[in-house]
Every structure is written in C-alpha cells, then in structure tokens.
Image: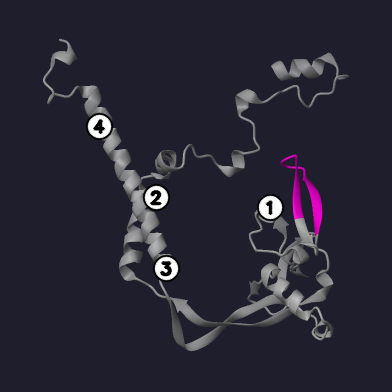
Amino acid sequence: MNTHEWPRCVKSARRKRRLVKTGRDKQLIQLDKRRDELRVQKRLLPMVALEHPYQRGWKRFFVLRDDHKHNPGKDFYEALLMKINTVEYHQDKSFKRKKRRKQRYVYQAKPQMLRELSQHSWDINRINLTEQEKACFTRVETFDVKTYRTEVKYVFAEPWRYVLKVVPHMVTHIKMIDADIERELAWIDEHIDNNHLWPRINLLTRGRSYRWRDEFNDRPKYINKFKNIPRYACKEAYLELET
C-alpha cells in the first residue's frame, strides 16, 4: 500500500521514530538552556556581608616600590599596575609549593609575574591601554614544540618597578545562596550525568565535541608507520612494520 495515499492523521513507523527522537532532542536543548539560565541567576546573586569576618590563607600582589612613590611618574605607573596586576592565594605565608626532585619532595618558592598580553588581547586592547602605556611593553615570540606554532605575547619591560606584597586574605562577604536554584541545578546535573547525556547535548548545542587529549594525536588509520624511519635504514626495518 502506498503511504502517500494514507490519511493525514496516520503516521508511518519511520516518522513516529523520528518524532520521538526529535522530541527527545528538543527536551535536551531546553534542559541545557534552563541550566544556563540558572547559572546566570546564581552568578547575579548579591554578596552578603559577614557578621564575623575570618582569615582564609594569604594573598600576594604587586605594589609600587617605596623608592618610586615620590617620583613624578608615580601616578602613571600606579594606573598601569591596576591593569596588569595579578593576585595569588596560598594557605602558607611563604607561598612555597611541594615539588618532587631526585626521588624526594622539596618546597620551592612559587613564582608570580605581571600580566602578559596575548596577540589577540593586544589587538583588541581589552584592558584599555593608552599609547604611552603600550610603549612600556615588549613583544616576545616563543615557539611551542607541542603545537609547532609561534606564540606572540607582550610583556611589561620594567617589572623591577614593582615588588610583591603579602597580606592576610580576609573573607568579609559571601555569595548569597538560593536553595531553589541550587536544588534545581543539582537535579539537572545529576540527571545528565546518570544518563550520560553530555555527548548528545554537546552535539545538539555546540557542534561535534572532542576530547582535548586527542587534539595532537593521530587516528590509528592515519598514522604513518614510515615517518620515523630514516632513508638509509636497512630493508629489514621496513619488513618488520608489515608483520
């Protein structure tokens, strides 16, 4: 029987399966949108002042050197520091991290540098640098052996003008917690994880997904077995690959 002669209310088996799959995909898209809406609402919640502030570790940031605070260019370098300053937090005042060296663990000082600008951030001027402030940066090119690409970044040319300062990290405000938002977010995340829905959601909303660890690895059928064999190798070296 020709399916085109059926009444309009009758659906074929293939169309029914397609409608079920399409409806399920629409539910996943709406679920992902709802999750994003809840995360935005959670981020926009105000901060609440604590009645009893407490210390939570230490923080370290750059300040202008004492011998430069009376120079004519004091205001210029302090304004520039607000744009390139970095802040790090640590549970210990010494800011030392544990590192394994020669089969034993030692504690080494954790380095901290001023903010470095990528080529994209420099072109769009994300931190609103003036022409006078741009003259204080140096263009540095480095070659990444993993990606075989030359990376360009702009580094502050006079970092000796600033020194690190360590102060206690005092917690005076906390984010307001909405129980309804937290409950719904927890249910959505648990539902997606338990049913393994992330691959399908990523395919529907963000295109084909891939794992970062596979970015620089060749697929088995595209691996060239003769790539690492020198031209002057003996015949047996090529015969071993075929076996």
Find the distance from the CA under tag 1 to the CA under tag 4. Answer: 48 Å
Give amino acid for label 3. Answer: Leu
What is the crowding at mark 3: few (fewer than 14 residues within 10 Å), some, or many (at least 20)?
few
On the image, the x and y values in percent for residue 90 come to 64, 74
Q: What element carries label 4?
A: helix
Give amino acid for label 1. Answer: Asp
What is the crowding at mark 2: few (fewer than 14 residues within 10 Å), some, or many (at least 20)?
few
Q: Quickly name the residue at label 1.
A: 123
- Residue 90's place in the image compared with 115, above or below, is below
Question: Is there a contact, CB below 8 Å, between mark 1 and mark 2?
Answer: no
Classify residue 55 by image quadrant. Answer: bottom right
User: Does 91 lie within the magenta span?
Assistant: no
- Residue 143's place in the image compared with 15, above or below, is below
Mark 1 against mark 2, which lies toward the viewer?
A: 1
Residue 243 seen by the camera: no
Mark 2 against mark 4, which lies toward the viewer?
A: 4
Residue at horizontal 81 percent and vertical 69 percent from the top: 159
On the image, the x and y values in percent for residue 40 come to 41, 61
Which numbered disc covers residue 19? 4
- Mark 1 or 2 closer to N-term? 1
Q: What element carries label 1?
A: helix
Q: Quickly name the residue at label 2.
A: 193
